[in-house]
Image: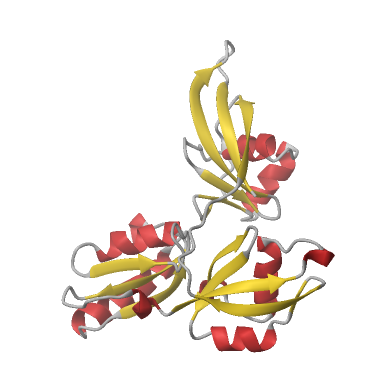
């Protein structure tokens, strides 16, 4: 099985262990937060032998915890042990963004897998595991220059991503060309970033500069942001591709 998941072998072994626990001990296994790529692997590995459910605390959450269990288990949202937290602050020192909240949590020593989605609209929220919440609320008192207050949230929050779109003409759908053009960096720098593991496609690190991107692929570039590629099914007279890039804020 591992040969089908090149680059994800360690993760797959962990999921196989979860599968063994759920199947042979007839117990419920709760995972950390997984991104969409990891969620897809879990469902592929587990197959139909067991029940696989996911929830991220928010409606439309990308990062979700998963429960792997025998069919006879009746699962409720509370079983996912997720705490939604609102970040309350005064804006006199500027707006707090996604990267600021994530950075503050990582600086506390919190593992990324213990934190779900982060939303930085008119109000700021993040999801975390119930286990880590007491430590976070006791220690996180400031983000950037702003004093903050953390408050449990019991609302049904839907995440709606804000983005800007731009059109691009690409001579190739190679990853190095896509990163260079869409993020406005020299191609040599884009190639180096890819080889160093700083670029992900659909939440998975891709280190091949010649990797071919496709319609609806999500490309993220460390410290630069992320963009969704939308193929407009158009070509110029020279045979170049006309695509749109939806840049998530």
Question: Is 127 rendered above or below residue 246?
Answer: below
Specify the quadrant of the image occupied by residue 38. Answer: bottom left
Along the line of sight, the residue nearer the viewer: 89 or 137? 89
In the picture provided, is 50 more to the left or to the right than 31? left
Specify the quadrant that holds the N terminus.
bottom left
- Check the image and name the residue furthest to the left: 72
In the picture provided, is 107 more to the left or to the right than 217? right
Q: Position of residue 209 (x, y in %)?
A: 59, 42
Question: Is 136 rendered above or below residue 126?
Answer: below
Residue placed at 30% from the left, 75% from the top?
Answer: 76
Residue placed at 29% from the left, 63% from the top?
Answer: 45
- The reply to whether residue 198 is in sight is yes
Along the line of sight, the residue nearer the viewer: 217 or 127? 127
Q: Position of residue 141 (x, y in %)?
A: 73, 82
Question: Is 9 rendered above or below residue 159?
Answer: below
In this figure, which colouring scheme has been used for the structure?
secondary structure
- The reply to whether residue 1 is in sight is no
Specify the quadrant of the image occupied by residue 14. Answer: bottom left
Q: Position of residue 132 (x, y in %)?
A: 54, 84
Residue placed at 37% from the left, 57% from the top?
Answer: 40
Residue placed at 32% from the left, 77% from the top?
Answer: 18
- Check the image and name the residue furthest to the top: 237
In the picture provided, is 200 more to the left or to the right than 5? right
Along the line of sight, the residue nearer the viewer: 104 or 219? 104
Question: Is 169 rendered above or below residue 74?
Answer: above
Total numbered badges shown on the rendered structure: 0
Q: Position of residue 226 (x, y in %)?
A: 61, 48
In the picture provided, is 41 more to the left or to the right than 246? left
């Amino acid at each position: 099985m591992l040969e089908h998941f090149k680059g994800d072998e360690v993760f797959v072994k962990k999921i196989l262990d979860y599968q063994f626990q759920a199947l042979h001990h007839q117990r419920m296994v709760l995972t950390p937060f997984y991104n969409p790529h990891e969620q897809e692997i879990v469902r592929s590995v587990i197959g139909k032998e067991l029940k696989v459910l996911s929830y991220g605390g928010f409606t439309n959450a990308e990062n979700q915890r998963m429960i792997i269990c025998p069919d006879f288990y009746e699962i409720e949202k509370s079983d996912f042990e997720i705490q939604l937290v609102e970040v309350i602050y005064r804006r006199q020192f500027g707006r707090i963004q996604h990267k600021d909240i994530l950075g503050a949590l990582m600086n506390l020593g919190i593992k990324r897998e213990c934190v779900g989605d982060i939303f930085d609209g008119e109000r700021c929220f993040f999801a975390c595991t119930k286990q880590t919440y007491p430590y976070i609320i006791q220690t996180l008192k400031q983000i950037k220059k702003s004093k903050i207050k953390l408050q449990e949230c019991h609302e049904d929050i839907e995440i709606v991503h804000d983005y800007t779109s731009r059109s691009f003409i690409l001579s190739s759908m190679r990853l190095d060309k896509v990163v260079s053009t869409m993020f406005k960096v020299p191609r040599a720098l884009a190639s180096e970033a890819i080889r160093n593991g700083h670029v992900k496609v659909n939440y998975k690190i891709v280190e091949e500069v010649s990797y071919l991107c496709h319609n609806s692929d999500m490309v993220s570039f460390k410290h630069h942001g992320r963009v969704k590629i939308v193929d407009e099914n158009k070509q110029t007279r020279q045979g170049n591709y006309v695509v749109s890039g939806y840049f998530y804020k």
